[in-house]
Image (tube, rainbow, N blue to C red):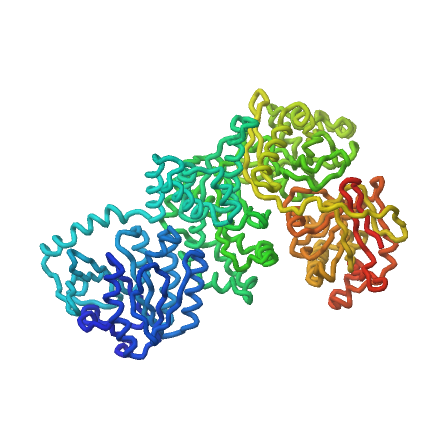
Amino acid sequence: MNVLSRRVHTGIDEFDNMIDSLRLGDNVVWQVDSVEDYAIFVQPFANQAVKDGRNIIYMRFGNHPPVVSKSEYIKEYHLIPNNGFEAFATQVYHIIAKEGKYAFYIFDCLTELLEQWCSDLMLGNFFKITCPYLFSLDTVAYFAIIRNKHSFDSIARIRETTQLLLDLKNISSELYLHPLKVWERYSPTMFLPHKYDNGSFETITSSVETAELFRPKFAEQRSSGHIDFWDKLFIEAEGLLELKVGDAKRKEMFSRLIHLLIGKDKTISKLAHKYLTLEEIIKIKNRQIGTGYIGGKSVGMLLARNILKQDDSLDFSSILEAHDSFYLGADIFYTYLVQNSWWNLRMKQITTEHYFSEAKVLKEKLLTGSFPAAIRERFMEMLEYFGQSPIIVRSSSLLEDNFGNAFAGKYESVFCVNQGSPEERYQEFENAVRVVYASTMDENALNYRLKRGLSGKDEQMALLVQRVSGDYHGMYFFPALAGVGNSSNLYVWDKQIDPKAGMLRLVFGLGTRAVDRVSGDYPRIVSLDKPLLWPVDIDKRSKYSQHDVDLLDLSKNSLVTIPADTLFYENPKIDRSLFGEIDQQATMRMRELGISGSVSFTLTFQKLLSETQFPNYMKAILACLQKSYRYPVDIEYTVNFNKDNSFHINLLQCRPLQTKGLGKTINFPETTDPDRTLFYVNGDFMGGNARIPLQYVVVVNPHEYSVLTESKKHTVARIIGMLNRNFNRDNKAALLLSPGRLGTTTPSLGVPVNFSEISNMSVVCEVEFETAGLMPELSYGSHFFQDLVESDIFYVALFLKKEGTFYNESWISSQPNILSSWLPEQVAFESVIKVIEINHINGAISMEIYSDIISQKCVCKW
């Protein structure tokens, strides 16, 4: 196609002469004082396009009157911007793809989008992803923006992207057109102002006249156009603080800001209206970088703190550690994609066909991108505020920590020890942001969204940046205590325990060891109505306790793990008696081996739980939050002590605890015949009262598994994942029996499955095989168990030496294995994995699991 054939007429001959005509591929942006002025130039363009037989599309989304007359020759698409940036941008993208090459577009005034998105940043993002796509298809598109409604940064981004930027001024009812950018065209008078009158233009060449006309307009733009619409909105909100709380304008603004900053979820929004104030919303914004939602994790933390502070029953304010968090708005995530030209890849990734394959590509790219200069400047300001205090960058996505979707452990959190030069500390922080962004493309996160019907939902990633809670101990930094707490305790291992009292997972040092299943280590499980009660016998407490401590090493600028004994030996000022006690037997054995001066210390937390108010406060905190949420809650916390052993609790996170509750009482079998029983336990199960019919049993043989190479143990996990895809709970309900810890990263301790590889099981059962060190871990409250609870998967632990436990291995050995009929290529693993199809009697299911919370009994029988 030659140059002449690529020319496009504007519908106004003198306008064509001024700009040397339009070209296919041109995006034309009109900066105007009113939509009516824009329409004056749109209608001739549309008329000419009709005359030339063009495919004309009108993108209609504004509340203003139409900018072009209805015509049978113009297709009109009605768009809905209030569903958010991604939904709107995606709809426009699909329309452009559908209409194809050489289409002509007329858009309503883009400034209208600010009323829905309240972010110039996102408007700039929309323009940067839409215009290059239009350009690639040889289209011509008209856009308009209202003068003085946009930040200089947004105008700069539009100028950078568009082919034509035209400034149309209305001065004393006279129109002046001033081309600011006309790509690859030039004339000696093209970029001078031109006075418009009914189809003709007069070029203004006098500097005196030009200055006289435009100086007042420039001053006006400088005074009102230099800040983002988002900032203007909050400045307006600050002006309403002097009004009474019940004032209609103040209430309306408060509701609007909750909708824009906190989110659209009705239950969370209701809590925010009750426990936040307009003053607090403004304070949140003042610690925000970028625009948009602050995300579920940030919202949960802020709500929980305010709920506790407003409770008069206990003086929670006196024990709550202050926080000074920053919030990276969700819009930065999309800006990062747009800035690095990855939006088309994102559009491809969210399709069903490329959901997983393109995620791998996008994840790699997310680890390498750059941020806009304005965002980098704000990052540096925040880091200057924190100085060299350690910080943590935590995911806080739109869907995270909401009712129904916890996303527990699906996205990354990254510690920044924050040591070194300003440049080094900045680079460490920026890399941490990239890592969290990239975690949105992790396979586990993608599977979680897909499994819960969220793959098509808007899932922007906001970030929560928190000062790490703790203190310096030499070159180490860590809190005294950390962990997770649940207001409802579904893991009831003793009849004395009240499930409604709540429970804790408690560790010394950083809480990383409390939320994950860690090799060779066990947090302390605390039932808050019976805090001194242990889930294991006294002779096993040393083995099933915490042995290592996670902390930040300032000299190495990294997260490290060291033995607790070493930590206490190197830091004798720590009052270790509060957290544990000397293991006399282990110490004696060490001395017998000639290790003089060595002391073995067990982190039992007995003194903490018996001689301080810590368990009472934690019980009260969980009860208070559950009452306000009207739903069980899950929290993360740290504890730091003063010299007098008084303490402060830092509430880091609060979210609804996904649980179906204890369930209705079932008719538990009065007697059980060992010959018709697969297993029987007292306690050591989770899932409430249940009666679950089974059609399949999948068994991992502990003897065979324990002697496999590490790579083959990983293969076993993948095979279980293949089998998992064959099951569903309606007609293929399955029980998985596996030695040791499921989901561990250490294959010698259990089968290293991802949760997505067992997500369709109805029941999972971890079986003790002590000979090879394969032991179950009752890690209720960890991310792994949160997944089980959310997915309504019943859990059982079989400690074979525990009194009252029965396991019928002989029945398993006697059953045929159908693994090869399902997966013929895995016949080599028939000795390791057995798939048993349960026989039916007269069409009825013959194997069922029964559990009863009150008696603490669970049986699997036929």
Image quadrant in which you'd find residue 647: top right
- 552 vs 690, nearest the viewer: 690
Task: Classify the position of the N terminus by image quarter.
Answer: bottom left
Residue 684 on image: x %, y %: 76, 42
Number of numbered callouts drawn = 0
Q: Quadrant of residue 124?
A: bottom left
Residue found farthest to the top: 644
Identify the residue shown where x is 18% and y is 68%.
18
Residue 850, given in percent of the width and then of the height, sits at 79, 49
Q: Is residue 62 above or below residue 255?
A: below
Q: Is residue 634 above or below residue 835?
A: above
Most foreground residue, 563 or 415? 415
Q: Quadrant of the C terminus?
A: bottom right
Residue that appears at 65% across and 42% down: 781
Residue 128 visible here: yes
Is residue 722 toward the left or the right of residue 193 in the image?
A: right
For the residue pair 835 and 280, the one nearer the viewer reads as: 280
